[in-house]
Image (spheres, grey):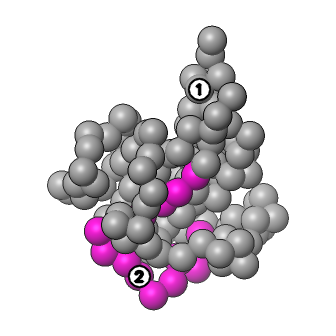
Amino acid sequence: MEKKKVAFICVHNSCRSQIAEALGKHLAGDVIESYSAGTETKPQINQDAVRLMKEIYGIDMEANGQRSKFISELPEVDMAISMGCNVCCPFIGRAFDDNWGLEDPTGKSDEEFKSVINQIEKKICELKRIILLP
């Protein structure tokens, strides 16, 4: 089976979409190629996200080459998923296949961050299950 290319999109591409890219690679890398991007970028990935992903999964997003990227840097993808911008989500040249409606945990407690990370993990596992359906 050829892997589906999945883009996780958020305005700044610094937190939720980065977590989704990392968890997509970690939990579903056998069926999807994970990417993330936004219409704006940040100088670095959200450091709380980096710290908690290392703590929970042993994933070092920065050491693995993840960085904040523009939508124009994406390859052509099979699926595009919005993280839930709560504003006008970026247009990437095609319709979104899903909107996960996740709250941005930036600046919030570790518990709130972990809740969002857990939601993303569940959604990645569900996405993998859907892709594997015959």
Residue contact at pointers 2 and 1, CB within 8 angstroms: no
- Is residue 30 visible to the viewer in this orientation of the structure? yes
Q: Which residue is mark 2?
A: 42
State the residue at coordinates (65%, 22%). Answer: 132
In the picture, the quarter occupied by the C terminus is top right
Task: From the top left corner, tell me how far across and down residue 16 is, in percent.
Answer: 48, 59
Task: From the top left corner, tell me how far across and down residue 25 is, in percent.
Answer: 68, 52
Position of residue 101 relative to residue 14, above or below, is above
Q: Which residue is mark 1?
A: 131
Helix, strand or loop for disc 1:
helix
CA separation in Å, label 2 and label 1: 31 Å
Q: Earlier in the sequence, mark 2 or mark 1?
A: 2
Residue extending furthest toward the bottom: 43
Specify the amino acid type for callout 1: Ile
Q: Nearer the viewer, residue 37 or 52?
A: 37
Residue extending furthest toward the top: 134
What span is in magenta?
34-50
- Is residue 104 visible to the viewer in this orientation of the structure? no
Task: From the top left corner, tell me how far across and down residue 56 is, in percent.
Answer: 76, 60
Helix, strand or loop for disc 2:
loop
Query: Circle 2: is it few (<14), some (14-19), or many (20+) Cα within 10 Å?
Result: some
State the residue at coordinates (69%, 41%). Answer: 28
Q: Which mark is residue 99?
A: none
